[in-house]
Image (spheres, coloured by chain):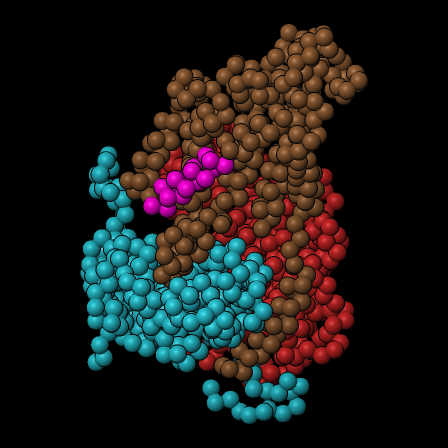
């Protein structure tokens, strides 16, 4: 999984992360591995309950009460997040890691001017005077696409549209000059046209500031648009990881394939749509081996025993034992 | 099409059976315990009140001046006697009748009236809602004691007067609570769905909305009952309560006032009875709200 | 051309009184005078972003919102605000959020039986229960669901139950307000396929509300694109998607996030010994 070409730009490394909800017998995240480097957007795609958001929160050291790390390592910019104390974590958040949430309205304080919320974040992470913090906030507002930033500084969240609010949340996340931005479904609450503009903004930030982004989404279309690489999660496991175009065009895991065939697209009519039979497993259900096996048309008995994410090709990995079947299907077109 | 759907149907069915077994509802253990203890306490008090005639060792109103202020454990007077030599245990038992009856009446009436008015106001909205909200605000500002004194003057002191007075004042709490809950509920999709289904309004209100919001008013009523018992106690203290010689806990404590420092049992036993009733009702309220919230 | 089943003329909905300090600024014009008609057996889509007025329009058609102006006629006769039972029966609705659209305290069976009994569609309780069970068959749910409450079901299953409830009274028009947008991707497909099957098998006419052109493409024949309370473009789905005439439609199409086409030969046999049959696609 570790890629030599990005070793020097490496920002984040998650290895075999296991998360457990207190009192439950089985882990909710069961061996997730992930890398991110400066200058790239890494997507975690999955449905609700796949563990994608918990994984993201674990990276920020922001797990909800009752959820604990049961195993594995998380390293952000050479800091061990799992072992870090509250002091280290607090420094990490903001200064190294910024976070963007799904609901811009609840992520902002409704009674505080947006400029002050950004300035406050800048003050918390830098050695700035009040006027410097204000200048920084105005600069950030401009950076995230506010025309007339000095005037907008004094506005309240309710005076802004959903898209503009999300820009404010991004500005707050950037206030401490982080090198890694963690985005948790940042466009899910937004309209398609607004989503597009936010994605453009994030792409610009990666290019101009050289930051890395981990982008959690349930929407493969959004992931296709912004991510350089995608890790697909299902029931707490990363089932497949690879460069976006490769992964979406020639998936190497039956779940990715099934998901792609279940997405309605404009160029395919309903007869090309395939529902995935059955339902995702419940949280805390015991799942020996591949979690997707019970719903998988390619499954064989061995799929119910241990599985691991193994490298295939140069730059990809999959947890499917039968990935060669999918590889052969792709081969049909090229050989 | 049909292949994939029939496939998904069989898988859904087997998955569903596994899942429904696992998820069969268990209510939180703490809620069951609270509810059980509360019900035992209140049940025991109700039984004691009901069988006061059998359980009482003496007539609660019979005076026996020579044996006045006998301490607990005196022959024939397990909990002692009061200043007029009346048996405290017997008085406690008969007082339970009065106090529990008043509490139930003074809670049920406002609950029913308030919830009904609040539900209609919340569902109808518009002018009906504005009128009800206006009246509620006026009554909220009205001093209960002044109203009660006026009523005592008109109706004369007694249990009905207390119930009427409490009802007149406290229905507004239930009306406001129910109105807010119904307003929130009526915009939920399942209520819209019931309307689109063409169900008659009374049915939507009764079978759909009321069933989903009633938990809170009922829980509130349980804790309100505690407040009402304390209120009757306070009335007894002010001499506006249950008229003598019928015993009630509040009046018993009020009568014991001169003896607080010298003869503790006169005030302590009715005080304990009030505490027990309050504790029982609170536990029931707590248990019910936990149980309902879990659903 | 066949007589339209649903005809909406100059429909407008305004929220807020406009009185008080704000003057006309206090008013929100959700729908600003729109016209469209839906022919029997057709699936007609209203597409737009949030605030475009599409859901308000759906609510007007379903009788949940009083229009400020305009008329809605159904099967040739006008629908007045106080609809009669027959008119209410004929137009049913499927809601967006499967978690709030079923009464949490009623079993699925009780809810279905209630509707059947109120509309006198079943002579006896037993007949109503039998019909309820058939409705569950129709939407691909197990009959054991009759004794369960909504919390026992996942989002996709609840949406199927919502469809069963809507179909209980044999409606001629089904209003579907974003029926799959709250569902997970893998579940969306199964609900869309269910709606398509019902459309084909029952000849159901559908008014479909969505923000997602790809979803509309799967289910609908014609589409009206709404923006800011107005219809900016209307036409056959294929035509609107391939040759949009309104600027807004073009913006919407450009913003749609599409997936690259799959580069897999799905007709290859599972254990890739031999191709089963060559793809015709």
Q: Quadrant of residue A331?
A: bottom right
* Chain identifier, colour cyan: C
Instruction: Give x and y (percent) for residue A91.
Output: 64, 38
- Residue depicted at 32% across the width and 61% down the height: C62
Q: Is residue B150 above or below residue B277?
A: above
Q: Is residue B118 magenta?
A: yes
The tint chain B carries is brown
Left or right position of C163 against B264: left
- Residue depicted at 71% across the width and 79% down the height: A300
Q: Quadrant of residue A17?
A: bottom right
Nearest to the observer: residue A273 or residue C128: C128
Instruction: Give x and y (percent) for residue A104.
Output: 47, 46
Q: Which residues are magenta?
A: B107-124
Q: Is residue B271 above or below residue A214?
A: above
Instruction: Give x and y (percent) for residue B112.
Output: 45, 39
Q: Quadrant of residue A231?
A: bottom right
The tint chain A carries is red
Instruction: Give x and y (percent) for residue B12.
Output: 59, 72
Q: Is residue B111 magenta?
A: yes
- Residue depicted at 73% across the width and 69% down the height: A289
- Prevailing secondary structure of the magenta residues: helix
Q: Is residue C32 visible?
A: no
Nearest to the observer: residue B106 or residue A243: B106
């Amino acid at each position: 999984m570790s890629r030599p070409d990005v070793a020097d730009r490496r920002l984040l490394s998650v290895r075999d992360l296991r998360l457990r909800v207190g009192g439950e017998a089985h882990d909710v995240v069961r061996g997730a591995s992930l890398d991110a480097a400066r200058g790239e957007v890494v997507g975690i795609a999955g449905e609700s309950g796949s563990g994608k958001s918990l994984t993201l929160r674990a990276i920020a050291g922001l797990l909800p009460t009752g959820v604990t790390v049961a195993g594995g390592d998380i390293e952000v910019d050479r800091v061990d997040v799992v072992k870090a104390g509250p002091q280290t974590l607090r420094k990490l958040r903001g200064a190294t890691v910024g976070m963007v949430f799904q609901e811009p309205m609840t992520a902002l304080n409704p009674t505080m001017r947006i400029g002050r919320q950004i300035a406050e974040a800048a003050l918390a992470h830098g050695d700035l005077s009040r006027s410097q913090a204000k200048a920084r906030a105005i600069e950030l507002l401009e950076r995230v696409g506010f025309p007339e930033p000095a005037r907008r500084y004094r506005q309240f969240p309710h005076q802004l549209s959903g898209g503009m609010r999300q820009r404010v949340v991004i500005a707050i996340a950037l206030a401490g000059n982080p090198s890694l931005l963690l985005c948790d479904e940042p466009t899910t609450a937004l309209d398609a046209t607004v989503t597009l503009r936010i994605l453009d903004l994030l792409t610009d930030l990666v290019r101009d500031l050289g930051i890395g982004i981990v982008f959690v989404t349930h929407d493969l279309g959004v992931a296709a648009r912004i991510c350089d690489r995608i890790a697909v999660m299902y029931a707490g496991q990363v089932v497949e990881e690879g460069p976006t175009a490769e992964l979406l065009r020639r998936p190497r895991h039956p779940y990715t394939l099934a998901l792609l065939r279940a997405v309605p697209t404009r160029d395919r009519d309903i007869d090309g749509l395939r529902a995935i039979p059955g339902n995702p497993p419940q949280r805390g259900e015991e799942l020996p081996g591949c979690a997707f096996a019970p719903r998988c048309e390619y499954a064989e008995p061995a799929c119910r025993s241990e599985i691991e994410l193994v490298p295939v090709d140069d730059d990809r990995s999959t947890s499917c034992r039968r990935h060669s079947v999918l590889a052969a299907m792709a081969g049909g077109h090229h050989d | 099409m049909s292949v994939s759907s029939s496939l998904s149907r069989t898988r859904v069915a087997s998955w569903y059976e596994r899942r429904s077994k696992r998820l069969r509802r268990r209510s939180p253990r703490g809620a069951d315990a609270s509810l059980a203890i509360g019900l035992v306490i209140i049940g025991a008090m109700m039984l004691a009140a009901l069988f006061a005639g059998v359980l009482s060792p003496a007539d609660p109103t019979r005076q026996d001046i020579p044996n006045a202020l006998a301490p607990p454990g005196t022959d024939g007077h397990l909990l002692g006697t009061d200043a007029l030599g009346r048996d405290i245990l017997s008085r406690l038992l008969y007082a339970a009748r009065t106090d529990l009856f008043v509490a139930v009446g003074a809670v049920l009436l406002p609950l029913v009236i308030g919830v009904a008015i609040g539900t209609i106001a919340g569902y109808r909205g518009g002018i009906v809602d504005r009128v009800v909200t206006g009246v509620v605000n006026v009554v909220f500002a009205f001093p209960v004691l002044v109203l009660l004194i006026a009523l005592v003057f008109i109706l004369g002191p007694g249990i009905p007067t207390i119930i009427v007075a409490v009802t007149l004042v406290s229905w507004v709490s239930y009306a406001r609570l129910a109105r807010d809950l119904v307003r929130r509920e009526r915009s939920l999709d399942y209520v819209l769905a019931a309307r689109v289904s063409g169900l008659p309004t009374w049915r939507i209100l009764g079978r759909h909305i009321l069933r989903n919001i009633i938990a809170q008013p009922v829980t509130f009523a349980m804790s309100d009952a505690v407040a009402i018992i304390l209120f009757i106690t306070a009335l007894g203290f002010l001499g506006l309560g249950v008229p003598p010689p019928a015993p009630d806990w509040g009046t018993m404590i009020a009568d014991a006032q001169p003896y607080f420092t010298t003869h503790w049992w006169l005030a302590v036993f009715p005080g304990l009875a009030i505490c027990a009733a309050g504790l029982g009702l609170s536990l029931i309220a707590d248990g019910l709200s936990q149980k309902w919230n879990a659903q | 051309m066949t007589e339209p089943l649903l005809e909406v003329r100059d429909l407008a909905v305004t929220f807020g009184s406009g009185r008080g300090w704000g003057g006309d600024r206090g008013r929100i014009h959700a729908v600003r005078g729109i016209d469209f008609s839906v022919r029997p057996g057709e699936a007609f889509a209203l597409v737009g972003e949030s605030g475009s007025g599409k859901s308000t329009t759906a609510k007007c058609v379903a009788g949940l919102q009083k229009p400020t102006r305009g008329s809605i006629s159904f099967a040739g006769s006008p629908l007045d605000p106080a609809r009669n039972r027959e008119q209410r029966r004929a137009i049913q609705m499927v809601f967006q959020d499967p978690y709030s659209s079923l009464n949490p305290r009623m079993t699925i069976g009780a809810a279905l039986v209630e509707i059947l009994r109120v509309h006198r569609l079943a002579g006896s309780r037993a007949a109503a229960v039998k019909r309820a069970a058939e409705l569950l068959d129709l939407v691909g749910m197990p009959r054991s669901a009759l004794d369960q409450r909504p919390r026992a079901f996942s989002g996709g299953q609840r949406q199927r139950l919502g469809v069963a409830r809507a179909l209980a009274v044999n409606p001629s028009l089904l209003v579907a307000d974003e029926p799959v947008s709250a569902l997970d991707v893998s579940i969306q497909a199964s609900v869309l396929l269910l709606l398509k099957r019902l459309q084909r098998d029952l000849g159901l006419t559908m008014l479909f509300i969505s923000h997602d052109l790809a979803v509309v493409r799967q289910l609908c024949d014609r589409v009206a694109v709404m923006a800011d309370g107005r219809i900016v473009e209307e036409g056959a789905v294929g035509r609107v998607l391939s040759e949009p005439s309104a600027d807004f439609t073009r913006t919407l199409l450009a913003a749609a996030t599409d997936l690259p086409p799959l580069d897999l030969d799905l007709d290859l046999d599972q254990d890739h010994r031999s191709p089963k049959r060559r793809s015709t696609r």
